[in-house]
Amino acid sequence: MKILALESTCDETGAAVVEAVVVESGVEVLSSVVASSSEMHEKYGGIVPEVAAREQVKVVTSVIEEAMKGVKREEIEAIAVSVGPGLIGSLLIGVETAKALAMAWEKQLIPVNHLKGHLMANMIRGEDGGMAALPAIGLLVSGGHTELVKMKGIGEWEWIGGTRDDAAGECFDKCARLLELGYPGGPAIQKWAEKGEGGSKEVKLPRPMIHDGSLEMSFSGLKAAVAKLVESRKSLSNSDKCLIARELNEAVVEVLVSKTMKAVDDYRYANVWLAGGVAANKMLREELERRCVEAGVKLWMPEFKYCTDNAAMIGAAGIMQLLDKSWVRPGVLEVRAEPGMGL
Ligand code: KG4
Ligand code: ZN
């Protein structure tokens, strides 16, 4: 069963063809094409929604054509598309394109929640074959969301915690802007953090809500603390920037890992699924892996290329939805631009 999937919730435009041959062995990605307008946002230090959407209109057709190379449209069973949460202009491009294609090619449409899509990147067949196991605690960390979910089965999701304010990725992006490290901020913070040597004793940032006994998080205070640090110094040397980047990366990772392990303890689940753009962070992957091994639970993480926005993960979710209808609320192809998970 082959599916064409589209993703356009933010500044990326993705198309992918994915296939589930034997469901237990995971979803095979036949093609995954991603076009990004991130360089265009660099000079503003963040995404300009109108610029993103205008770029997406230009590239969406060629991205789909490239993903469909070597695949006949008759082989496609259905078209999956991200319906939100996301930027309204960007979302509409993917959704309207998917609707038009579905009508012209007479295919079924599968609406996919972008956040579930991120987590379902763990269903993509890895190098060792197979797919992630359930039940699991899911940690979804992206530019717009930081959420903990309990996943009993494919369609059984329950929100159990998350950030009260900024997302972890947003915190990286805003702090990178304050430190003038470029956009997107997460990879820039990681790069500068890796250059920082000898620990981060000279700079101390808070670990918000880390010991409050809840599964809630907060990252806006960290952003404020970095702003204060920047203001308090006349100018920042490169080595100052390295130290701050490293301390910030450590602070965010410590909070994320500690809350995830608390969820594992609370619910006694044997699997953890990591997902979202921030899941590409090396320190996060290594620290969560270390703590999961210590606790005797299995950590599942997507390959780097399936952490940040892509259509393969939407295809993986689409296939799972087709096979197990229990997880979709019936009859909707509604675009959800407003915040919130919409699970
Ligand atoms: O999932 P994603 O591509 O888009 C959203 O759905 O938001 O996530 C983008 C976020 C951005 O905030 C970006 O700075 C962050 O993921 N990110 C990273 C890394 N790569 C991307 N954060 C930390 N370390 C990384 N290596
Ligand atoms: Zn995303």
Image (cartoon, rainbow, N blue to C red):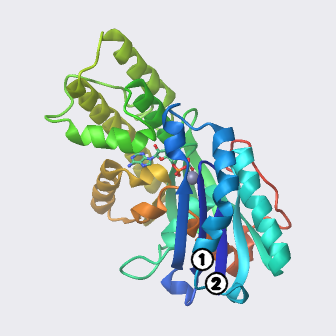
Q: Is residue 233 above or below residue 265?
A: above
Q: Are marks 2 and 1 in contact (CB under 8 Å)?
A: yes
Residue at image point 64% right, 49% down = 55
Q: Is residue 29 above or below residue 120?
A: below
Residue placed most toward the observer, 272 or 38: 38
In the rendered image, the quadrant that contains the C terminus is bottom right
The disc labelled 1 sits on which kind of residue?
A: Val
What residue would you read off at disc 1? Answer: 17
Label tally = 2
Q: Position of residue 154 (x, y in %)?
A: 62, 71
Residue type highlighted by circle 2: Lys
What residue do we see at 73% from left, 89% from top? 74
The spot of residue 130 in percent (x, y) is 44, 81
Q: Is residue 137 left or right of residue 182?
A: right
Q: Is residue 44 left or right of residue 281?
A: right
Q: What residue sits right under mark 2 in the picture?
A: 2
Outermost residue, left direction?
198
State the residue in front, 291 or 188.
188
Q: Is residue 285 visible?
A: yes
Displayed quadrant of residue 192: top left
Distance of mark 2 from mark 1, alpha carbons? 7 Å
Query: Does residue 116 lie above or below 340 as drawn?
Result: below
Does dot 2 land on a helix, a strand or a loop? strand
